[in-house]
Image (cartoon, rainbow, N blue to C red):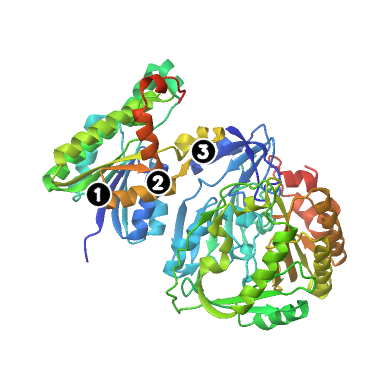
């Protein structure tokens, strides 16, 4: 065990944690079960808030549990250890015509993390969230019990663990259902929209013909102008270089480079540049799905105080009005966000008791941490979300009040029965009392 | 179709070795023999590689890495099944220097596991490769073998032995079809170095190191520093005059 400061992706804090690397499935129970200190599984630490943190407690690092176990070419079922990265599956599977159908905006996350946060992608309207593609999960509880669960076998445990924030036991292995794919290329379109009405029209008309839809929204311009992107996998191959270069943000700047001045200019420039270059092109899946993976440690750009992500989902009926209201607040606040994403979710009900996605529209915004001022903005946004009967995404959250959490996640009481008493996170302490 | 390359990895469950194997099976169909001490751990690696390359042949051999007679039989048995194209000798262990100083048993084991054992394996394969007139033996040494330092000279001296031995083999096989590759990784993020991570040391990933090893072997390099910056760092450390070097606590 070593003690060292650990930050999540938002870099809001770096408190000391006792880190234990799980490097072989053979010794897991010795490291996890019946320990004095409460622990939490930790993969790549790509969640933004405190769901992956457990200060002064133990973190069981899962990234060395990175072995495939078996693959059935007939069914597409991939059995693997929990620390395998989505990137490693995609890079192995896609050249052979298989794909993990649902992935978030980064592929640098572990299978365990993807399950625990029930992550979603640009194709929610077609394929639901990650949990819809998990066949079975193997959990190790800190009391020594091993729980294997799936939709048909111990389905209550399955529903608690998908989106269960790692609190039901340590996910040590899982079987994922891969899907057939034409190849690594996508046929994509970028269409500018001037306001939210245009956005919703585009989203609705795209749902039937386009597997992937997402939009970037200019959060400085209160009407909600933005760029709508949609894509489908294609058998057409592009000659474009697929292995684009990676860059690393080499240092933490003394102040956030995302500030009032730079953001307005960036947003305006981005909108007009892309607007001119609109229309069709064929691009590689890594560029389409994971553009930010190309800039390593891009989160440093927000300076030493770190940043918040604020991601909400609002039921469709209230969606447009609430989104408009939130955008107004953000524009009024000034120091908005560059990585602002607006997307509609489909009607598919998620598997997990604490899963985030639900039928409606999701808005994700990032804000440099400016202390009180930022929190005041969040309070105003919270009020809009709560009134519109929406909820916030736990994988991004570092600050929501408990009553908003309880209002947004009605299956909480049911979930609590499945918690592992030897596991705790900073988020569970903040929102569940322990 | 060409016969698949036959590759043997000694210490196949080590992080660097596993990543090398992943790259090899990703690029081609290979005939791979994984040698190690623990069957369960070998089978974990073998299963992973089988998923990655169902067309490759992957065998595991459980053996002891300390006894010369066992090493001889293990190697003879492997070669009896077919000529070997690449041997990667990757096993090792890294105990605390201070523990080695205080416990001669541990000191001896460290030198045997990191020095003597790889040498015996390489020598056993060298005989067969010499007869065949072709093939590559790659040994994992360490930057720690370049100059003795107070912080890890027991481990370092064993790796130094491997380096001198590799040099001798290179001399022996100069001009022949047999290539000897000495790999010197810097500190790498593996279970062996887990305890270094809390002092802020920036470690290379096993995957990065493995990539450079595989391309280095392909290119027939005689010495591979990985990551490459260690060539320069060690050149400086090796050439520091003693009156400066002895003032440093490295």
**Mark 2 chain:** B
Task: Tell me whether circle 3 and circle 2 mark residues in contact (CB < 8 Å).
Answer: no
Q: Name the residue under label 2.
A: B209
On the image, the x and y values in percent for residue B57 come to: 30, 56
Residue at horizontal 34 percent and vertical 29 percent from the top: B239
Q: Name the residue under label 1.
A: B220
**Mark 1 chain:** B
Q: Is residue B80 left or right of residue A182?
A: left
Callout 2: SS: helix
At label 1, counting other C-alpha atoms closer than 10 Å, the crowd grade (few under 14, some 14-19, many 20 or more) is some
Q: In this view, does A144 lie to the left or right of B36?
A: right
**Mark 3 chain:** A
The one of A25 and B25 positioned closer to us in this rendering: B25
Res B128 quadrant in image: top left
Evaluate whether residue B185 shows in this view.
Answer: no
At label 3, counting other C-alpha atoms closer than 10 Å, the crowd grade (few under 14, some 14-19, many 20 or more) is few
Callout 3: SS: helix
Numbered circle sitting on residue A27: 3
On the image, the x and y values in percent for residue A74 come to: 45, 69
Evaluate whether residue B9 shows in this view.
Answer: yes
On the image, the x and y values in percent for residue A72 come to: 45, 64
Q: Distance between the residues labelled 1 and 2?
A: 16 Å
Q: Do labels 3 and 1 share a chain?
A: no
The one of B102 and B37 positioned closer to us in this rendering: B102
Residue A162 in the image: above or below residue A203: above
Q: Nearer the viewer, mark 3 or mark 1?
A: 1
């Amino acid at each position: 065990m070593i003690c060292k400061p650990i930050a999540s992706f938002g870099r809001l804090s770096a408190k000391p944690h006792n880190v234990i690397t799980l490097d072989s499935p053979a010794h897991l129970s010795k490291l996890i079960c019946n320990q004095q200190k409460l622990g939490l599984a930790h993969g790549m630490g790509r969640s933004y808030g405190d769901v992956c943190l457990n200060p002064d407690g133990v973190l069981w690092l899962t990234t060395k549990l990175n072995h495939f176990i078996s693959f059935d070419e007939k069914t597409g079922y991939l059995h693997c250890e929990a620390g395998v990265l989505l990137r490693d599956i995609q890079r192995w599977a896609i050249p052979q015509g298989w794909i993990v159908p649902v992935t978030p905006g980064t592929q640098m996350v572990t299978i365990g993390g993807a399950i625990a946060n029930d992550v979603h992608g640009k194709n929610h309207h077609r394929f639901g969230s990650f949990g819809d593609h998990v066949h079975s999960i193997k959990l190790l509880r800190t009391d020594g019990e091993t729980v294997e669960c799936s939709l048909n076998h111990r389905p209550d445990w399955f529903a608690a663990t998908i989106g269960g924030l790692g609190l039901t036991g340590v996910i040590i292995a899982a079987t994922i259902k891969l899907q057939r794919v034409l190849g690594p290329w996508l046929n994509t379109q970028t269409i500018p929209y001037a306001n939210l009405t245009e956005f919703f029209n585009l989203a609705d008309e795209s749902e039937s013909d386009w597997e992937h839809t997402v939009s970037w929204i200019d959060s400085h311009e209160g009407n909600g102008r933005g760029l709508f992107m949609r894509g489908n996998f294609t058998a057409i191959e592009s000659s474009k270089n697929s292995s684009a270069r990676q860059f690393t943000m080499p240092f933490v700047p003394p102040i956030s480079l995302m500030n009032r001045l730079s953001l307005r200019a960036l947003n305006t420039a981005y909108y007009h540049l892309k607007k001119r270059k609109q229309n069709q092109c064929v691009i590689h899946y890594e560029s389409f799905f994971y553009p930010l993976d190309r800039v390593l440690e891009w989160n440093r750009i927000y300076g030493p105080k770190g940043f918040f992500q604020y991601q909400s989902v609002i039921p469709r009926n209230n969606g447009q009005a609430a989104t408009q209201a939130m955008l107004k607040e953000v524009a009024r606040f000034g120091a908005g966000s560059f990585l602002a994403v607006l997307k509609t979710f489909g009607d598919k009900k998620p598997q997990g008791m604490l899963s985030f996605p639900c039928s409606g529209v999701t808005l994700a915004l990032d804000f440099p941490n400016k202390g009180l001022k930022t929190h005041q903005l969040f309070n105003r946004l919270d009020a809009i979300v709560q009134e519109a009967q929406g909820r916030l995404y736990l994988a991004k959250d570092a600050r929501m009040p408990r009553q908003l959490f309880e209002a947004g996640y009605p299956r909480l009481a049911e979930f609590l029965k499945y918690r592992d008493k030897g596991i705790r996170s900073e988020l569970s302490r903040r929102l569940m009392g322990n | 179709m060409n016969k698949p390359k036959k590759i043997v990895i000694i210490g196949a469950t080590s992080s660097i070795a596993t990543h090398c194997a992943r790259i090899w099976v990703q690029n081609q169909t290979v005939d791979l023999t994984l040698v190690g001490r623990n069957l369960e751990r070998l089978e974990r690696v073998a299963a992973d590689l089988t998923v990655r390359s169902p067309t490759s042949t992957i065998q595991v051999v459980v053996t002891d890495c300390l006894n010369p007679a066992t090493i001889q039989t293990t190697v003879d048995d492997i070669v009896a099944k077919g000529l070997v194209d690449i041997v990667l000798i990757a096993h090792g262990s890294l105990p605390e220097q201070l523990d080695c100083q205080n416990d001669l048993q541990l000191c001896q084991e460290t030198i045997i596991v990191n020095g003597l054992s790889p040498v015996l394996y390489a020598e056993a394969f060298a005989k067969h490769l010499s007869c065949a007139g072709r093939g590559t033996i790659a040994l994992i040494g360490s930057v720690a073998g370049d100059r003795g330092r107070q912080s890890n000279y027991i481990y370092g001296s064993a790796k130094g032995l491997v380096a001198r031995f590799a040099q001798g083999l290179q001399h022996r096989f100069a001009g022949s079809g047999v290539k000897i590759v000495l790999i010197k990784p810097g500190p790498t993020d593996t279970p062996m170095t887990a305890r270094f991570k809390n002092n802020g040391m920036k470690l290379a990933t096993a995957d990065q190191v493995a990539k450079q090893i595989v391309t280095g072997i392909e290119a027939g390099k005689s010495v591979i520093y990985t990551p490459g910056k260690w060539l320069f760092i060690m050149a400086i450390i090796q050439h520091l005059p003693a009156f400066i070097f002895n003032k440093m606590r490295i």
